[in-house]
């Protein structure tokens, strides 16, 4: 019973007209005849073979024994980051995880943006350097006393970050924002400026960089691109969940802690996440097709937040000289 249910679950994930026997033979590196014996239930799958198949098709073996209303899914969790080298490895692993999905024709992504999407703040500009600095300040104890001016990311870190960022360009993307999406970045600039870790000059420059990013996003909306859709939702709280969909597979990325995340390709879970995200979209306003007044109101409210912080920093700067 278990083996039959397990094989049916694998079959449900295979593309149409794909042979279950071929899939089992390839995954287990066994002959066609050996695979046929297992799919016809003439031979039992070994524990090792079950584990290999469960990993290949992201199936939670516990779920096959369900007798209650609880459900079990197979997830991966990225390693916790403690230093700059591990952050570089995180960017590389994320790139390798996303690349096979995003290279497929008709792949698409939905990003529920509680914070500015990661892809916008990884690269070699000052805002990207600041976000990397903040992450390492929170994750690496050796950064406790390091100021922003003292921080210079390694060439390898910048290279891996830019590679990950490149995946997001020209992708069929849907983002859900609120005007609070920029709040955490503003708070970080203000906090580290007040703590003496960032100079007033750099803090003001970071504010200008954030305004340039907002302008870039507004220009993408104005371009009426069919590849990029920006929704405004002021009712529901975003959570930084990311759903990647291809014709043959879906993958859901769920935040766990700073930068680290859970990843699942469980078909039922991804469909449930897609349904929930689509419900969010129904209660959101598509800015691409909204009138100019609504678009400008949305972006101007974010510009106003940035300008308010700039005024606060400038006022502090004047007081310091008095």
Image (cartoon, helix red, strand yellow):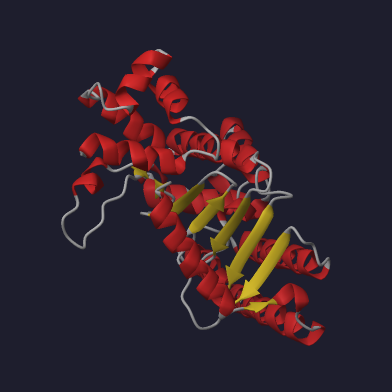
Q: Is residue 98 left or right of residue 103?
A: left
Image quadrant occupied by the C terminus: bottom right
Q: Residue furthest right?
A: 223
Q: Is residue 309 left or right of residue 296?
A: left
Q: Nearer the viewer, residue 129 or 149?
A: 129
Image quadrant occupied by the N terminus: top left
Image location (x, y in percent) of residue 194: 49, 68
Q: Residue furthest left?
A: 67
Does the image show residue 153? Answer: no
Image location (x, y in percent) of residue 89: 47, 33
Q: Is residue 59 left or right of residue 181?
A: left
**Residue 68 sits in quarter:** bottom left
Image location (x, y in percent) of residue 226: 77, 61
Q: Nearer the viewer, residue 158 or 33?
A: 33
Q: Nearer the viewer, residue 168 or 64?
A: 64
| Residue drawn where x is 39% and y is 38% of the image | 10
Does the image show residue 129? Answer: yes
Q: Nearer the viewer, residue 165 or 73?
A: 73
Above or below — where is 72 with respect to 100? below
Above or below — where is 168 with respect to 85? below
Image location (x, y in percent) of residue 81: 38, 42
Above or below — where is 85 with respect to 64? above
| Residue drawn where x is 40% and y is 55% of the image | 268
| Residue drawn where x is 25% and y is 41% of the image | 61
| Residue drawn where x is 55% and y is 51% of the image | 244
* Total numbered labels placed on residues in the image: 0
**Residue 45 sits in quarter:** top left
């Amino acid at each position: 019973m278990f083996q039959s249910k397990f094989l049916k679950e694998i079959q449900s994930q295979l593309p149409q007209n794909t042979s279950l026997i071929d899939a089992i033979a390839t995954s287990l590196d066994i002959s066609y005849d050996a695979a046929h014996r297992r799919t016809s239930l003439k031979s039992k799958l070994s524990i090792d073979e079950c584990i290999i198949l469960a990993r290949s098709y992201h199936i939670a073996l516990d779920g096959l024994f369900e007798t209650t209303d609880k459900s079990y899914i197979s997830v991966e969790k990225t390693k916790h980051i403690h230093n700059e080298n591990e952050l570089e490895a995180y960017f590389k692993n994320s790139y390798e995880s996303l690349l096979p999905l995003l290279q497929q024709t008709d792949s698409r992504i939905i990003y529920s943006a509680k914070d500015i999407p990661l892809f916008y703040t990884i690269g070699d500009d000052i805002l990207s350097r600041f976000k990397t600095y903040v992450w390492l300040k929170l994750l690496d104890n050796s950064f406790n006393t390091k100021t922003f001016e003292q921080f210079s990311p390694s060439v390898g870190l910048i290279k891996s970050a830019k590679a990950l960022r490149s995946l997001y360009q020209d992708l069929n993307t849907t983002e859900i924002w609120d005007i609070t999406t920029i709040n955490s970045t503003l708070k970080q600039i203000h906090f580290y400026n007040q703590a003496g870790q960032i100079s007033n000059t750099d803090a003001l420059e970071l504010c200008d960089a954030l305004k340039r990013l907002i302008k870039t996003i507004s220009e993408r909306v104005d371009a009426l691109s069919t590849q990029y859709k920006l929704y405004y939702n002021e009712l529901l709280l975003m959570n930084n969940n990311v759903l990647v969909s291809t014709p043959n597979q879906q993958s859901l990325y769920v935040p766990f802690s700073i930068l680290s995340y859970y990843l699942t390709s469980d078909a039922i879970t991804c469909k449930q996440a897609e349904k929930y995200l689509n419900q969010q979209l129904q209660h959101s306003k598509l800015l691409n097709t909204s009138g100019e007044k609504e678009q400008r109101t949305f972006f101007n409210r974010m510009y106003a937040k940035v300008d308010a912080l700039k005024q606060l920093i400038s006022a502090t700067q004047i007081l310091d000289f008095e």
